[in-house]
Structure formats: structure tokens, C-alpha cells
Amino acid sequence: MFVGSGWLLYSGSIGAAALHSHHALQVLVARDGVVRITDGEGRASSGAVVVVAPGAAHAAAAAVPSGYLLYLEPRSRAAGRIRPSGGVASPRPNAAALGALVSAPEPRTLEAARGVAIRIVGLASRGGSDDPRRPGHASVRRALDLLPGLIERHGSDLRLPRIAEAVGRSAEGLSRAFNDEIGMSVPAYVRWARLRFVARSLARGRTLTEAAQDAGFSDGAHLSRVFRETFGIRPSELSGCARWTVGDEALD
């Protein structure tokens, strides 16, 4: 399980799932087999690549032996490039690009996973994906560097004004810079940062309850609710079987 800034990539077998919905935009790619997804009205979409819009009710009709699940923060630039036309869609990706992706070995490092995620965005995108850019403004770079420590110190009390104060910029100015350079609002980014903090804690051997407290959630139930709202699954479903790799890299 690889977690970055505004994205999460899972690699492995993908099980069937009952009807549910979640906050993140989801892209499913079959490395072996076919992805079969039904929407809330029972309409089926199938293919090597299937896109599920944020908040769209959907169910996985059958397991996929090997594939990728990419979750994207809906307000990120990467999600904006995909722009699904409906709740569930099956785009027709470039055959050569798809073949190169599914035949390549599964990623073992965060940078390799980021490369896979960028390629998946390109496959699912209507207009293709641009080259990724690093944040250019010093206050944004500093906020990204300081955020893990700010979450650790301030927990659930961390808000935009406190982050802006830490980097020496007005709340309005930092908010505008985040939207321009990261493609996400500060609250949306902090939400993902808290989930990355949870993943870091789990990687260090902390329990779910301890990880929730580390990241500023009120308790394990609060973490479970936010995690499920975002990804459609509970962290307890992954904590015992997933290897977590976490970083602050964005896709754009």
C-alpha cells in the first residue's frame, strides 16, 4: 500500500465488494482478468480500466486476481484530468500503454508506485496527463515539510490559520497558493496528511487506536469512519495484511 499527497495506490488481488461509495475518485486496473463494476442502479461496466466517480455507489461483481486500485483526492489535479462523465465508466486506454503497465513488475518503492499512479492517470484521462510539477512557492514547500510535525503537536486542533502562522503567510494567501500549486484546498490536503500519518504509524507497528491518536482523530471509530468514507474500506481490513509505504510526493 503506497500513500502519497492526495493519492493511494494498492497493488495485488482485488476482492469482490458489496454496494458502497466513498469520497475518493477510484481507478481500477486489471493486470490479470477483467474489472467488473456495477453502479447503484445495477448497470454494469467492465474492462481493463474502470473509473468510479467520487460519491458514486458501486459494487465489485467479481474478484480480480491481480490489479491496481488508485484512489485520488477528488479536488486534486490528477482527479481533474480524469473527469468521469458518469458514476462508473470504462474508458478505452491506449493499448500499448496499458500493455506496458500491466506487464511491468509491481512497484516496490514509493517513487516506482508514483510512476505507476501517473501512468494510470494517463490511461484513464480524457486529455492525457501533464508532466508532474513540484510546488514552486516557498511557503507551500515549507507547509508540506512542517505538516507532519504540526499534526503531531496540535492533533485535531490543527487548522489553516495555525499552518499559515507556522510558514509566515496569511491564511488567505496560503490557501490560494495551495489551490494553485497543489490543486487541493488546505483542509482537503490536511485530511489526506492525517491518513498518511496513520499509515506511517501503522508502518512503525502502532495499533489502530494509537495511530488514530497520533494523527489527531478523536478515536479509532473516527479514523475508521473517515478512512471508509475516503477509500470504501476500514483500516482494520488492511492493517494485518498490507505493507505501508508513505511519503509526501504529489502526482503533479
Image (cartoon, helix red, strand yellow):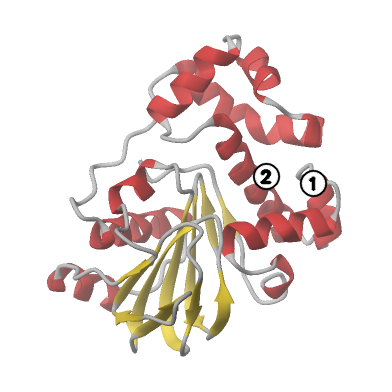
Per the model, the C-alpha gap separating discs 1 and 2 is 8 Å
For the residues bearing labels 1 and 2, Cβ distance under 8 angstroms: yes
Residue 191 or 249: which is nearer the viewer? 191
Quadrant of residue 113 within the rendered picture:
bottom left
* Image quarter hosting the C terminus: top left
Q: Is residue 171 left or right of residue 225?
A: left
Q: Secondary structure at mark 1?
A: loop
Residue at screen point 27% across, 61% down: 124
Where is 143 relative to 242, above or below?
above
What residue type is disc 1 on? Phe
Q: Is residue 222 left or right of residue 56?
A: right
- Tag 1: Cα neighbours inside 10 Å, few (<14), some, or many (≥20)? many
Q: Secondary structure at mark 2?
A: helix
Residue at screen point 74% across, 70% down: 236
Residue at screen point 42% across, 80% down: 38
Q: Which mark is residue 217?
A: 1
Q: Which residue is label 2 attached to? A: 194
What residue type is disc 2 on? Arg
- Whichever of labels 1 and 2 marks the residue nearer the N terminus, that label is 2
Question: Is residue 11 in view from this perspective?
Answer: yes
Where is 17 relative to 207, above or below?
below
Residue 193 or 77: which is nearer the viewer? 77
Q: Which mark is residue 207?
A: none
Q: Position of residue 242 (x, y in %)?
A: 63, 72
